[in-house]
Image: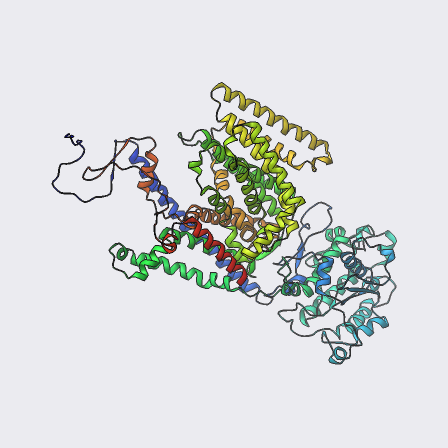
């Protein structure tokens, strides 16, 4: 039977070559305008990138110049820890006691008894002086054995345990006792004489602290009390180190002289105040300051409390200073426990910081420590990895025309086929640059580390700032964004709000329990809806690895470059763990997920299995042992258990509410959906108001029901947020952007916004060593951190696709606009010769390969996953 050929095929005598299909569109009056707008946005984005990079380079250059000019005499910050600093509470007008001492440019470590015994096993700490030095003795003993009654203490204390430390105190308010002279005899020029070191008859103290003077200021003590005191001090300084101060003083036995304590004159009893002469105490400290400056004596000048004593005011014949009032007890002479403990931390930091670092202890302080040498992986990343990526980028750019024309050899073609594409290399280059900046910002002495200080006023101001930006960036979504896509946009906005609270809380040293709960709950809710409301074919077998990689694509490389532990990045670790649980709970026996009894039964069974396996049976320990064998990862099993169970309620509440949304809200229409939303809003509003009422009443049991109260706060925020903008009509583009950058922000915040693995605030150092300087640094560096998070977040999709075996090419503006139009416009796909109809396919489909393992490696997800595990194992074992 003769069939007539369709019109669209040409009648030709020979076969014409196939050419790529073309798009034939219906005319659209707005298409040119949208294309032009997209091109303008690209140009603006490029200009913004150039200005941002120039700004960051300028800030880094100024920081390097500041380091070169100001840190030349004290590169290791050994002098700063004992000579320069301020109380962070000192600028407050309240009468709160001083608790947080900030050395100039570095972080002061809060020493525990374990730290002291680790640093000074079977050694001695000796204090000699008056009641001010006795306060330091008490503070040291309290660190070794908290809760010790001072009445039980004689003038010596020895800690219990294998590495016992002996702490002694000699009461010598006039610095003229025989015991002091005996202890000083073996010391010359600040070090022990060789004969005493070899003989073994003298147990040298690792820390030798001497100081007194307030008794010399008593009226009637002597006609020239300053001369008598100077003679006593000179007897001590004759045994101390003279000359230029060494650059590095850490890890050495030290003889130090303490300044004279200034009492809080307004607190003194009238008879005591009349018996003291304030000017004598000032002259004493001026003399100590002169011998420390000119002769290089080791004087703990930071114990003067204020930065310079000569600014104290003489009021009613006595010296008044708000600093002295804040740091002393009611008698005006005895130091507060917090102040004494911080002073002990100063001298312990000078003696022990570098020792603990060399022993491998996790010490956030960088005061008086030698920089650790880089591992081979860090050196490769800094000096070779960037060059390799840059060379590959240049090679692809140079040889790309030859690749198209088959003009290169087999080796070059092999590199081109199995190596990263141009777009992947470009994203890897950005990620590598930011990781190197993280390494230098957190590990080098160029940047300053500032103690975090909790302030309710600053917390409220920061949240108000986020609120204002969120309001000014409210925008309507695209008209085609409906249903779950619109609600997903709302959830991303809420994640951005939770992430903003998490950042502010971390910056100020506040609790992050609520923000962690909110992030786990919102992510669990999103995962549940995605798995329940979409078909399995859409999710595919790559949904699981894609999500895990999207959570950890920044945290995992940072672990290797920074040589930290995965549990340091607690939120990504918790998100990874609970994503695995959510995925397994929903995907196993998924055919019954629409039945409420079946689904809730699975949730209950999941809770029981997680509790039994990871709690009673300790299966997590076996999992950690397997990870240690497979990937050489060592984790604290008890800490893993604690973190895993702490926020269990957030994950399962997200799974439960996600099922309600997917099977009730998404399936309801019209009045039923409006009614369901109204009931949900009333319930959320009631729970939020109930929480606020109970919180105002001050019930202590609210902390024990952390999951319920946190859910009430999230629900209350959600209902207020939606009612303020009429439902999902408008969302904040800023909060949506922040929510999309979640993995980048959580991965880098401990090293690039904070420092010392999240224990301190990163400071550029040239804004000023005061509260105003800290605020200026926060403002500018927050902008830098936000831009770098955007740069790294922009690499997520490309890097994840590359790891999973997808090969993608960069999309031009015109192609992007064409893809957007395919959903609404009628598109006719025809070939040049009219021979065939072509279907639009997914641009990110993995290439198919039918060769051996080597040929399948670029596209085989299993082979690439095995390659990642082997690489992680090698890197862990070799570093």
Residue 328: give x, y in percent of width and height.
78, 53
Depth check, front residue: 358 or 39: 358
Q: Is residue 328 above or below residue 458?
A: below
Looking at this view, name the residue that lies furthest to the bottom.
Answer: 195
Q: Is residue 170 above or below residue 659?
A: below
Looking at this view, name the residue that lies furthest to the top.
Answer: 671
Q: Is residue 606 visible?
A: yes
Residue 500: give x, y in percent of width and height.
55, 41
Whether residue 211 sits left or right of residue 868 in the image: it is right
Q: Is residue 876 above or below residue 691?
A: below
Q: Is residue 259 above or below residue 584?
A: below
Depth check, front residue: 51 or 656: 656
Q: What residue is at 85 percent from the left and 56 percent from the top?
A: 150
Residue 306: give x, y in percent of width and height.
70, 56
Whether residue 560 sits left or right of residue 826 in the image: it is right
Depth check, front residue: 823 or 125: 823
**Residue 701 sits in quarter:** top right
Q: What residue is at 15 percent from the left and 36 percent from the top?
A: 10
Residue 780: give x, y in percent of width and height.
52, 49
Position of the N terminus by quadrant = top left
Whether residue 850 sits left or right of residue 837 in the image: it is right
Total labels: the figure holds: 0
**Residue 706 sits in quarter:** top right
Q: Is residue 726 visible?
A: no
Position of the C terminus by quadrant = bottom right
């Amino acid at each position: 039977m003769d069939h007539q050929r369709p019109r669209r095929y040409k009648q030709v005598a020979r076969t014409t070559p196939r050419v790529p299909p073309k798009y034939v569109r219906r005319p659209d009056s707005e298409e040119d305008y949208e294309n032009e707008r997209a091109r303008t946005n690209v140009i603006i984005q490029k200009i913004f990138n150039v200005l941002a990079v120039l700004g960051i380079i300028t800030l880094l250059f100024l920081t390097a110049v500041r380091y070169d000019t100001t840190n030349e005499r004290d590169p290791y910050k050994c002098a700063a820890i004992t000579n320069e600093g301020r109380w962070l509470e000192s600028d407050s007008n309240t009468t709160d006691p001083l608790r947080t001492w900030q050395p100039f440019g570095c972080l002061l470590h809060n020493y525990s008894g374990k730290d002291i015994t680790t640093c000074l096993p079977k050694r001695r700490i000796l204090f000699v002086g008056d009641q001010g030095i006795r306060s330091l003795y008490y503070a040291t003993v309290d660190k070794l054995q908290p809760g010790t009654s001072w009445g039980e203490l004689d003038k010596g204390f020895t800690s219990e345990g294998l590495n016992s430390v002996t702490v002694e105190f000699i009461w010598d308010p006039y610095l003229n006792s025989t015991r002091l002279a005996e202890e000083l005899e073996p010391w010359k020029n600040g070090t022990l004489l060789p004969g005493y070191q070899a003989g073994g008859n003298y147990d040298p103290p690792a820390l030798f602290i001497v100081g007194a003077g307030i008794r010399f200021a008593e009226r009637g003590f002597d006609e020239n009390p300053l001369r008598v005191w100077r003679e006593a001090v000179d007897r001590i300084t004759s045994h101390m180190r003279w000359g230029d101060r060494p650059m590095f003083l850490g890890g050495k036995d030290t003889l130090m002289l303490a300044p004279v304590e200034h009492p809080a004159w307004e607190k003194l009893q009238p008879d005591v105040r009349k018996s003291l002469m304030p000017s004598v105490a000032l002259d004493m400290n001026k003399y100590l300051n002169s011998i420390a400056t000119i002769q290089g004596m080791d004087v703990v000048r930071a114990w003067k409390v204020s930065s310079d004593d000569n600014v104290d005011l003489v009021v009613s014949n006595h010296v008044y200073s708000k600093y002295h009032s804040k740091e002393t007890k009611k008698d005006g002479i005895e130091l507060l426990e917090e102040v004494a403990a911080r002073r002990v931390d100063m001298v312990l930091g000078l003696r022990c910081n570098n020792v603990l670092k060399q022993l491998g202890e996790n010490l956030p302080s960088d005061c008086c420590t030698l920089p650790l040498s880089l591992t081979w992986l860090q050196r490769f990343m800094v000096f070779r990895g960037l060059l390799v990526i840059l060379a590959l980028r240049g090679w692809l750019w140079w040889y790309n025309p030859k690749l198209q024309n088959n003009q290169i050899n087999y080796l070059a073609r092999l590199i081109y086929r199995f190596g990263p594409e141009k777009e992947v290399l470009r994203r890897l280059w950005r990620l590598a640059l930011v990781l190197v900046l993280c390494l230098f910002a957190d590990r080098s002495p160029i940047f300053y580390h500032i103690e975090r200080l909790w302030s309710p006023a600053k917390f409220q101001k920061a949240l108000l700032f986020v609120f204002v930006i969120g309001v000014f960036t409210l925008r309507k979504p695209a008209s085609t964004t409906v249903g779950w896509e619109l609600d997903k946009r709302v959830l991303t906005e809420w994640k951005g709000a939770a992430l903003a609270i998490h950042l502010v809380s971390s910056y100020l040293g506040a609790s992050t329990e609520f923000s962690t709960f909110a992030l786990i709950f919102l992510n669990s809710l999103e995962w549940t809806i995605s798995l329940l409301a979409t078909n399995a074919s859409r999710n595919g077998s790559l949904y699981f690895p894609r999500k895990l990689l999207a959570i950890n694509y920044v945290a995992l490389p940072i672990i290797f470059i920074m040589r930290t532990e995965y549990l340091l990045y607690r939120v990504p670790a918790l998100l990874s763990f609970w994503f695995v649980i959510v995925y397994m709970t929903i995907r196993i026996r998924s055919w019954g997920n629409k039945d409420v009894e079946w689904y809730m039964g699975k949730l209950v069974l999941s809770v029981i299995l997680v509790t039994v396996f990871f709690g009673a049976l300790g299966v997590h320990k076996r999992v950690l042992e397997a990870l240690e064998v497979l990937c050489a990862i060592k984790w604290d099993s008890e800490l893993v258990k604690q973190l895993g169970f702490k926020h269990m309620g957030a994950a399962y509440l997200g799974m439960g509410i996600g099922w309600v949304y997917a099977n009730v809200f998404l399936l309801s229409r019209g009045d039923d959906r409006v009614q369901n939303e109204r009931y949900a809003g009333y319930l959320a509003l009631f729970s939020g108001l109930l929480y606020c009422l109970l919180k105002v009443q001050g019930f202590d049991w609210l902390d024990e029901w952390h999951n319920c109260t946190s859910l009430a706060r999230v629900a209350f925020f959600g209902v207020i947020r939606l009612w303020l903008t009429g439902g999902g009509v408008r969302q904040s583009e800023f909060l949506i952007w922040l929510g999309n950058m979640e993995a980048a922000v959580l991965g880098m915040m401990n090293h690039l916004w904070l420092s010392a693995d999240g224990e301190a605030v990163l400071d550029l150092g040239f804004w000023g060593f005061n509260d105003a300087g800290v605020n200026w640094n926060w403002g500018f560096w927050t902008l830098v951190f936000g831009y770098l998070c955007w740069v790294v977040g922009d690499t997520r999709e490309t890097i994840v696709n590359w790891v999973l075996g997808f090969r993608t090419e960069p999309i031009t503006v015109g192609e992007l606009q064409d893809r957007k139009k395919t959903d609404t416009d009628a598109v006719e796909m025809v070939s040049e010769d009219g021979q065939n109809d072509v279907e639009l396919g997914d641009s990110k489909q993995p290439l198919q390969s039918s060769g051996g393992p080597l040929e399948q490696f670029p596209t085989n997800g299993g082979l690439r996953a095995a390659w990642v595990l082997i690489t992680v194992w090698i890197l862990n074992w070799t570093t």
